């Protein structure tokens, strides 16, 4: 998983599910009427249980109860801010409600499943609107942060994930455009530190992943090539739109320009160059593949394919 995907998706969106859930062994039916001894000082366990309650209600299709549980959680959170920001919490929940609910085990017959599926389709459309709205509200809470702050940038990547799942292409593109502008400002800063340059390169690669995703190069090496299709191709036609590829290519090359500021023998630079070669191979771009392969060969000091890609047993 790309570096920023790990931070955004695992660190922000999945963290609540993975860690908060272990704080409770209660069921949703036991959580209807919680009373806190001091509502102005909610304990982390109580907040965890409330989040988990909202999640369980949603899994059961009890959307109204789920919304009430989350609204109560948000009120308590605002009374005494926790380690995670309010925006993180809102984006985490927005991502949860934007995902389709598994209903395959909720009916015993085919007709029952079909009726449930049709009802769920309508209700899920409302979920998508709600998720997009919540993501926008989350970003509004950090509007006062500098555009180049890492916290704000990571939250914006999280919002992109939410808008993607919520099928809100317009808002997703607006956030991407805003980040593109911010990164342009950072690229123009000649005094940027090496650490900051690494962060910027990771961000630019993550923007590329919005349009043309790639896992680490070793996994992608064995992956089936991905074809490009014209922008006006039917939606059902599989492949990456050419305009999307061009956007991703631009971000990949801008990221590499940041990494190229490192010494030629820097392992991170060699690894990034290797990843770029594989990326062009994955998307079937032989001309750029050969150009980047030559650059990798220059860095490694060899044309031996095994050395270029560390093939064979590793010590």
Image (cartoon, rainbow, N blue to C red):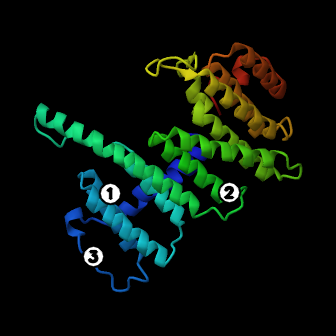
Residue hosting label 1: 55
| Callout 1–callout 3 Cβ contact below 8 Å | no
Question: In the rendering, at what x and y percent does residue 204 appear?
Answer: 69, 40
How many residues crowd around disc 1 within 10 Å: few (fewer than 14), some, or many (20 or more)? many
The residue carrying pointer 2 sits among few (fewer than 14), some (14 to 19) or many (20 or more) residues within 10 Å by Cα, namely some
Q: Position of residue 250 (x, y in %)?
A: 72, 31
Task: Name the residue: 72% across, 61% down.
Answer: 146
In the image, residue 14 sits, relative to residue 140, either above or below, namely above
In the rendered image, residue 149, in percent from the top left (x then y), is placed at 70, 59
Quarter of the picture holding the C terminus: top right
Give residue 33's position: percent from left, percent from top: 24, 74
* Marks 1/2: CA–CA distance: 29 Å
Dot 1 or dot 2, earlier in sequence:
1
Is residue 23 something one can see in this rendering?
no
Q: In the displayed structure, does residue 159 sit left or right of residue 253?
A: left
> Image height check: is 159 above or below 245?
below
CA gap between label 3 and label 2 equals: 37 Å
SS of the residue at dot 2?
helix
Task: First in sequence, mark 1 or 3: give its number.
Answer: 3
Q: Is residue 193 left or right of residue 89?
A: right
273 lies above or below 1: above
Residue 150's mark?
2
Q: Is residue 140 left or right of residue 285?
A: left
Q: Is residue 120 visible?
A: yes
Q: Which residue was labeled with disc 3?
A: 34
Q: Are marks 1 and 2 in contact (CB under 8 Å)?
A: no
Q: Which mark is residue 239?
A: none
Q: Quadrant of residue 301?
A: top right
Q: Nearer the viewer, residue 207 or 275?
A: 207
| SS type, badge 3 | loop
* Marks 3 and 2, the one that precedes in the sequence: 3
């Amino acid at each position: 998983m790309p570096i920023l995907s790990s931070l955004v998706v695992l660190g922000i969106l999945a963290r609540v599910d993975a860690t908060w859930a272990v704080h409770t062994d209660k069921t949703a039916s036991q959580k209807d009427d919680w009373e806190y001894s001091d509502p102005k000082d909610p304990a982390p366990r109580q907040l965890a249980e409330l989040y988990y309650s909202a999640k369980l209600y949603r899994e059961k299709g009890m959307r109204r109860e789920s919304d009430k549980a989350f609204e109560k959680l948000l009120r308590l959170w605002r009374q005494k801010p926790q380690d995670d920001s309010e925006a993180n919490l809102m984006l985490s929940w927005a991502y949860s409600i934007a995902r389709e609910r598994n209903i395959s085990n909720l009916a015993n017959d085919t007709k029952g499943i079909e009726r449930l599926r049709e009802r769920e389709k309508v209700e899920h459309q409302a979920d998508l609107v709600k998720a997009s709205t919540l993501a926008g509200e989350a970003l509004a809470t950090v509007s006062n942060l500098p555009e180049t702050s890492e916290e704000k940038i990571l939250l914006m990547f999280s919002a992109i994930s939410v808008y993607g799942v919520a099928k809100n292409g317009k808002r997703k593109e607006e956030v991407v455009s805003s980040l593109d502008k911010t990164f342009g400002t950072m690229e123009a800063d000649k005094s940027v530190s090496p650490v900051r340059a690494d962060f910027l390169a990771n961000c630019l690669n993550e923007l590329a992943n919005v349009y043309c995703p790639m896992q680490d190069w070793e996994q992608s090496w064995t992956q089936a090539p991905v074809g490009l299709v014209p922008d006006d191709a039917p939606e059902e036609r599989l492949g990456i739109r050419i305009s999307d590829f061009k956007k991703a290519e631009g971000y990949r090359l801008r990221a590499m320009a940041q990494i190229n500021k490192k010494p030629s023998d820097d392992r991170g630079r060699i690894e990034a160059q290797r990843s770029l070669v594989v990326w062009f191979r994955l998307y079937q771009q032989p001309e750029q593949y050969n150009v980047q392969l030559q650059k990798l060969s220059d860095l490694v000091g060899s044309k031996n394919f095994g050395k270029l890609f560390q093939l064979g047993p590793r010590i």
